[in-house]
Image (tube, rainbow, N blue to C red):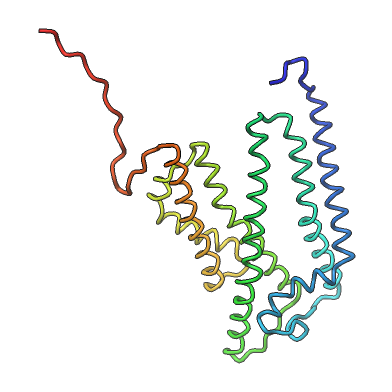
């Protein structure tokens, strides 16, 4: 712990925060410029799920507005800027927070950020490579079954792809959140087991908020992996508590009672 003579004045902390925000915005602006210049290859990457679904983007996607091409390029550049600048932004934020952390917290910071980034990328890749092609193929076939030609606007398609990828990336962070809450004693495995039915309802509501459409098929595709992640989180919490030697009670069993203090027997 720093002595009072070594602590920074409040204005110095504000100055450090100002420079942190400035460096983060500079990194975002620089990465966005890269995204603006390299729009075509990034757009081909975003059109990958539609091609995997067996469809030709040139035949399905359309521009309807006069300024839509420029708006799409700005959208792609901003999205690229956020993705590319995120490691630098996290580094600047960590640089600002590190002096206030204890040595134990400093050692845990890198594994937490690394695990969170890995889970987010895993969820995004799972959505991009597995679920999006199946979802797009389903909706194209659904339109054909109704006798309607499939025509989508490129801005709406990009919104759908980005929301699906980001939504699954955030959903895959659930095990990390549960591990942290269990590690700090805020959450218990018994609580996760007891409120499993309530969690199903919450997962369905969360999936409905995350998915860009309100159809049951997309909702099902997101809700099922989220529930599986919930079960994985439950077993992770059980493993943490067993490692610490905490008793794991079965669902529906009464809570364990603390042993009462033994009373002194009267002396005859």
Of residues 58 and 66, the one nearer the viewer is: 58
Of residues 6 and 28, the one nearer the viewer is: 6
Which quadrant of the figure has residue 63?
bottom right
Q: Residue at x 28, y 27 (%)?
A: 259
The relative height of residue 104 versus residue 249 in the rendered view (above or below) is: above
The relative height of residue 239 versus residue 165 in the rendered view (above or below) is: above
Q: Residue furthest bottom?
A: 147
Q: Quadrant of the C terminus?
A: top left
Q: Residue at x 72, y 16 (%)?
A: 3
Which quadrant of the figure has residue 169?
bottom right
The relative height of residue 178 versus residue 212 in the rendered view (above or below) is: above
Task: List x then y, in percent, for residue 178.
Answer: 52, 47
Which quadrant of the figure has residue 258?
top left
Q: Residue at x 66, y 30 (%)?
A: 103
Q: Is residue 125 left or right of residue 9?
A: left
Q: Quadrant of the N terminus?
A: top right
């Amino acid at each position: 712990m720093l002595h009072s003579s070594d602590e920074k004045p409040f204005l110095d902390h504000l100055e450090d925060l100002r420079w942190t925000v400035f460096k983060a915005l500079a990194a975002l602006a620089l990465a966005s410029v890269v995204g603006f210049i390299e729009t075509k290859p990034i757009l081909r990457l975003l059109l990958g799920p539609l091609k995997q679904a067996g469809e030709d983007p040139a035949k399905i996607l359309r521009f309807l507005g006069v300024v839509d091409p420029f708006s799409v390029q700005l959208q792609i550049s901003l999205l690229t800027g956020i993705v590319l600048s995120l490691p630098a932004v996290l580094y600047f934020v960590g640089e600002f927070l590190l002096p206030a952390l204890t040595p134990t917290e400093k050692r845990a910071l890198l594994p937490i950020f690394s695990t969170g980034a890995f889970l987010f990328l895993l969820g995004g890749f799972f959505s991009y490579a597995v679920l999006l092609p199946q979802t797009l193929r389903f909706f194209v076939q659904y339109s054909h079954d109704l006798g309607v030609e499939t025509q989508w606007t490129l801005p709406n398609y990009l919104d759908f792809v980005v929301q699906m990828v980001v939504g699954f990336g955030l959903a895959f962070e659930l095990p990390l959140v549960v591990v942290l809450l269990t590690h700090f004693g805020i959450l218990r495995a018994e609580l996760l087991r007891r409120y499993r039915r309530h969690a199903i309802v919450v997962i369905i509501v969360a999936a409905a908020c995350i998915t860009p459409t309100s159809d049951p098929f997309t909702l099902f595709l997101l809700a099922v992996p989220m529930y599986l992640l919930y079960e994985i989180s439950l077993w992770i919490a059980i493993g943490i508590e067993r490692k610490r030697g905490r008793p794991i009670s079965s669902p529906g069993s009464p809570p364990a009672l603390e042993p009462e203090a033994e009373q002194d027997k009267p002396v005859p």
